[in-house]
Amino acid sequence: MHLDVRTLRDFYYRNALGRVAQKIVRDRVRAIWPDTHGRTVAGYGFAVPLLRPFLPDSRRVVGLMPAPQGVMHWPAGLPNVSVLCHETEWPLETGHVDRLVLMHGLETCDNASALLDECYRVLGPGGEALFVVPNRSGLWARSDRTPFGYGRPYSLGQLEAQLKAHDFITEDHVSLLYQPPSTRRFWMRTGPIWERMGRSIPAVMAGGVMLVRASKRYPPTRRGIGQRVREPLGALAPKPVAKPV
């Protein structure tokens, strides 16, 4: 179940807790990919809060928003780069994307397998994807006050197994958002302390969000996936109907 785009917008841009979460996750994403000069960066779901640092130096930035969620103009005050699309049919060329971010997309989609196939299709050689998903063991997945409380939360093992089955190689992972999902003054003020403690002793505390970085395996090992990648239109491709004379 996708949340409405207005709900997501209000959380990340008009809510104090959402602005804190946005900064923590966005800073980590930028640290993972510090240089995207000349590269194409795409985000799916509601990943646009994480894409702003890539606007100045990237060759192209695209924000893909699924139809059940809805779309909004982004970025504010600049030419729009967001587009409405089907969950598993993106208006992007095969092998066109260098860096791909998914947030509020994988855990809420109707067909995770088809979505991961589409991620694989659009990534080019050497391309990397960053999956931002709610942590099954964290507090954020247990609260419906934030968007991370909706959809299917993941454990690290579950997500890695699903990525491996779709020809992705897990490169790295990190947990974030250790503070409780509360807007009470005490938790908001002590948020940075919880983040430092959580990263230093991850076995004791569970972060609310997992970031898993994966690269595209090529050639694919799944039977038949290569043909689907070479012909992304599939049954929609025009076929001749005239019979030979």
Image (tube, rainbow, N blue to C red):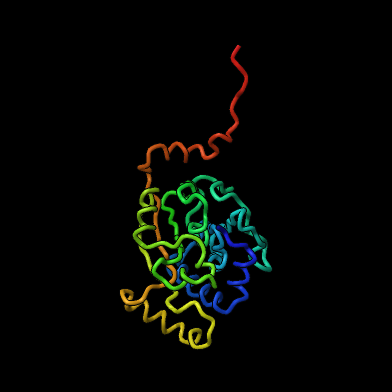
Spot occupied by residue 204 in the image (x, y as percentages of width and height): 32, 77
Q: Residue at x 57, y 59 (%)?
A: 2
In the depicted structure, whether residue 216 falls above or below residue 135: above
- Identify the residue at the far top of this view: 245
Q: Nearer the viewer, residue 1 or 231?
A: 1
In the depicted structure, whether residue 94 falls above or below residue 201: above
Q: Residue at x 31, y 74 (%)?
A: 203
Q: Nearer the viewer, residue 144 or 198?
A: 144
Q: Residue at x 58, y 56 (%)?
A: 64
Q: How many marks?
A: 0
Spot occupied by residue 24 in the image (x, y as percentages of width and height): 48, 74
Q: Nearer the viewer, residue 157 or 176?
A: 157
In the displayed structure image, the side of residue 4 where residue 53 appears, left or right: left
Residue 186: tell me if it is visible: yes
In the depicted structure, whether residue 6 falls above or below residue 88: below
Residue 41: tell me if it is visible: no
In the depicted structure, whether residue 74 falls above or below residue 139: above
Q: Residue at x 37, y 48 (%)?
A: 165
Which quarter shows the C terminus?
top right
Q: Nearer the viewer, residue 140 or 59?
A: 140
Spot occupied by residue 219 in the image (x, y as percentages of width and height): 37, 43
Which quarter shows the N terminus?
bottom right
